[in-house]
Image (spheres, rainbow, N blue to C red):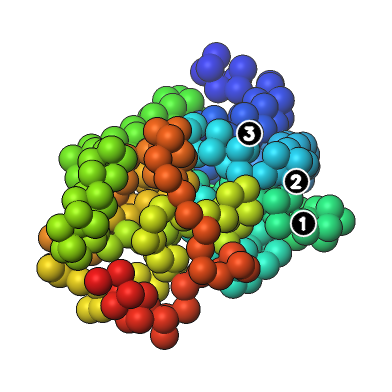
Amino acid sequence: MPIALELFVKYAYLILFVWVLVEQLGIPVPSIPLLLTAGTLSATHKLSAFVALLCVLAACMISDSMWYLLGRSYGNKVLKLLCRFSLEASTCVTKTEGYFTKRGPVTLLFAKFVPGLSTVAAPIAGQTGMPFGRFILYDLAGSLIWAETYLLAGRFFGDIAKKSAPFLHVLSHFAVLLVALMVVGIFMYRLIKQRKFMADVRARRIEPEELMAMIDDAEKTGDSPPFIVDLRHPLDYLPDPRVLPGAVRVGPAELGIHSDRIPRDRDVILYCTCPSEETSGKVAMQLHKMGIDRVRPLKGGFDGWKVAGLPLVAYKDDVPAEQPLVQLTSAISQTT
């Protein structure tokens, strides 16, 4: 047995525990290759699949419980911190909040299969006030499903490899190299994807001061002001329910579905609370593909506007909620 593989087998359980713990704490180091490797080695009886599963579950419970408690105590601040480390920041917070709104704790059963969603699911569960006992039950079930899926897939591959002695021999010599290549490959794919997305967002965004000047000019000349859309999720309204002057609240999914109601004769400005305008940037690019050319994300989003000291106003509804679809047309007419 090659020395590298021998060392991996000797410390496999510790490596598996630490690696999964680090990933679940928010560091983008994919653990799927290690789960597959552990499953493959269990087929050759070099590792125990049951012990490997216990190590993974322990790592998930420690990290997820910590993020749950931090999310319960600090809410949106924790989410912003996590998304700055995530390579799937374009979807992590908004997608997870949407899942929790629709499915509640069931989200935890499949969260670990979705890049980006895995890490932020626990703090959002805490932010929503989910009881800790219920969180642990669903999170443990989700972690079990996730870990067993890849361990069994590796075991299946190992059973096939055992049937061919030459293939098993080659695999045993290059197993560690294959794992390293898979880890690097997944990491590079996510990194390139995220950088391309952020480059597209930066090319389209508008500065807060520029938007304020557009609003002031519209008031002076009597022209139609920019159509400003608040894409924040209801949970994000809790720290500060105010909006930009003239803004309407519309959910990202609703805005895309009803793009035919968005005005084409003036600028459409989108803003959210995600780091680097991920949500508004993604929606802006989707609307561009639908033929809406004058749509731009606000640089810095809601927080950037506040930091710039620009005015915020109370929204017409006292209860934070996404703008109902039936009100979208009237909201557009009111800002004309």
Instruction: Name the residue nearer the viewer: 335 or 127.
Output: 335
The image quadrant that residue 167 belongs to is: top left
SS class, disc 1: loop
Q: Which residue is mark 3?
A: 25
Amino acid type, label 1: Gly
Question: In which quadrant of the rendered image does the N terminus lie?
Answer: top right
Say whether residue 332 is left or right of residue 13: left
Q: Which mark is residue 117?
A: none
SS class, disc 2: helix
Residue closest to the far bottom: 326
Answer above or below: position of 181 versus 67: above
Q: Which residue is mark 1?
A: 129
The residue sitting at 15% across, 58% down in the picture is: 221
Amino acid type, label 2: Arg
SS class, disc 3: loop
Q: How many marks?
A: 3
Percent x, y of residue 198: 29, 39
Label 2 crowd bin: few (<14), some (14–19), many (20+), radius 10 Å:
many
> Which label lies toward us, 3 or 2?
2
**Mark 2 vs 1: CB contact within 8 A:** yes
Q: Which residue is mark 2?
A: 72
The image quadrant that residue 245 belongs to is: bottom left
